Image (tube, helix red, strand yellow):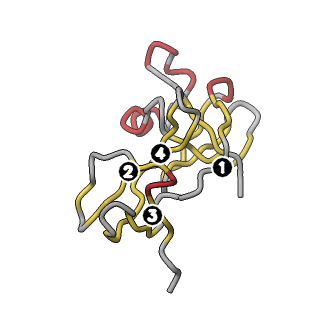
């Protein structure tokens, strides 16, 4: 497993923090709580990934966090409702210093925040 972290970028930080070819796509992905996976270090930029999307960004705003228990696309079960779900987002709660997740249940994204203790992995297969 790789390194994970947040990338708290806002337009006020400057467009030069994001590779010009990735800027427009990153604007729609940017969120100060999303957890990105570190992919590769280049001379001027690092590559980070969220789900299937990769972005080249300047390293200085990348803040490491612990490896999340669940990953985007992973099948899980919500303990409170016993519903099968898929992880749609992996986030970082800055005050609690903990991961939280958003889930898709029956094709619909839930607005509830789920912490690791609230969900469990589904068996593979």
**Camera-side mark, 3 or 2:** 2
Give the Cα separation between the discs numbered 3 and 1. Answer: 16 Å
Report helix, strand or loop for mark 2: strand
- Front residue of this view, candidates 28 and 124: 124
**Camera-side mark, 4 or 3:** 4
Res. 28 image quadrant: top left
Report helix, strand or loop for mark 4: strand
The numbered dot on residue 67 is 1
In the rendered image, which residue does mark 4 sit on? 100
Residue that extends furthest to the bottom in the rendered view of this protein: 125
Query: What residue lies at 61% left-to-right and 47% top-to-bottom?
Result: 37
Report helix, strand or loop for mark 3: loop
State the image coordinates of residue 93 (x, y, percent, origin top left): 50, 34
Which sits earlier in the primary sequence, circle 2 or circle 1? 1
Which sits earlier in the primary sequence, circle 4 or circle 3? 3
The numbered dot on residue 73 is 3
**Camera-side mark, 4 or 1:** 4
On screen, residue 31 versus residue 104, left or right, reads right
Q: Residues within 10 Å of mark 1 (few under 14, many from 20)?
A: some
The numbered dot on residue 6 is none
Q: Residues within 10 Å of mark 2 (few under 14, many from 20)?
A: many
Which sits earlier in the primary sequence, circle 4 or circle 1? 1
Give the Cα separation between the discs numbered 4 and 2. Answer: 7 Å
Q: Residues within 10 Å of mark 3 (few under 14, many from 20)?
A: some
Compared to residue 119, the image places residue 26 above or below, namely: above
In the rendered image, which residue does mark 2 sit on? 102
Give the Cα separation between the discs numbered 3 and 2. Answer: 11 Å
- Front residue of this view, candidates 53 and 8: 8
Query: What residue lies at 67% left-to-right and 38% top-to-bottom?
Result: 46
Which sits earlier in the primary sequence, circle 3 or circle 2? 3
């Amino acid at each position: 497993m790789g390194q994970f972290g947040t990338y708290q970028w806002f337009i006020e930080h400057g467009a030069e923090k994001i590779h010009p070819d990735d800027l427009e796509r990153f604007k729609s992905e940017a969120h100060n709580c999303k957890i990105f996976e570190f992919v590769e270090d280049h001379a001027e930029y690092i590559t980070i990934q969220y789900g299937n999307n990769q972005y080249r960004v300047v390293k200085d705003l990348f803040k490491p966090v612990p490896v999340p228990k669940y990953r985007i696309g992973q099948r899980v079960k919500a303990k409170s409702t016993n519903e099968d779900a898929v992880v749609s987002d992996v986030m970082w709660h800055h005050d609690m210093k903990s991961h939280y997740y958003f889930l898709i249940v029956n094709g619909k994204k839930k607005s509830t925040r789920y912490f690791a203790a609230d969900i469990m992995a589904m068996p593979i297969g």
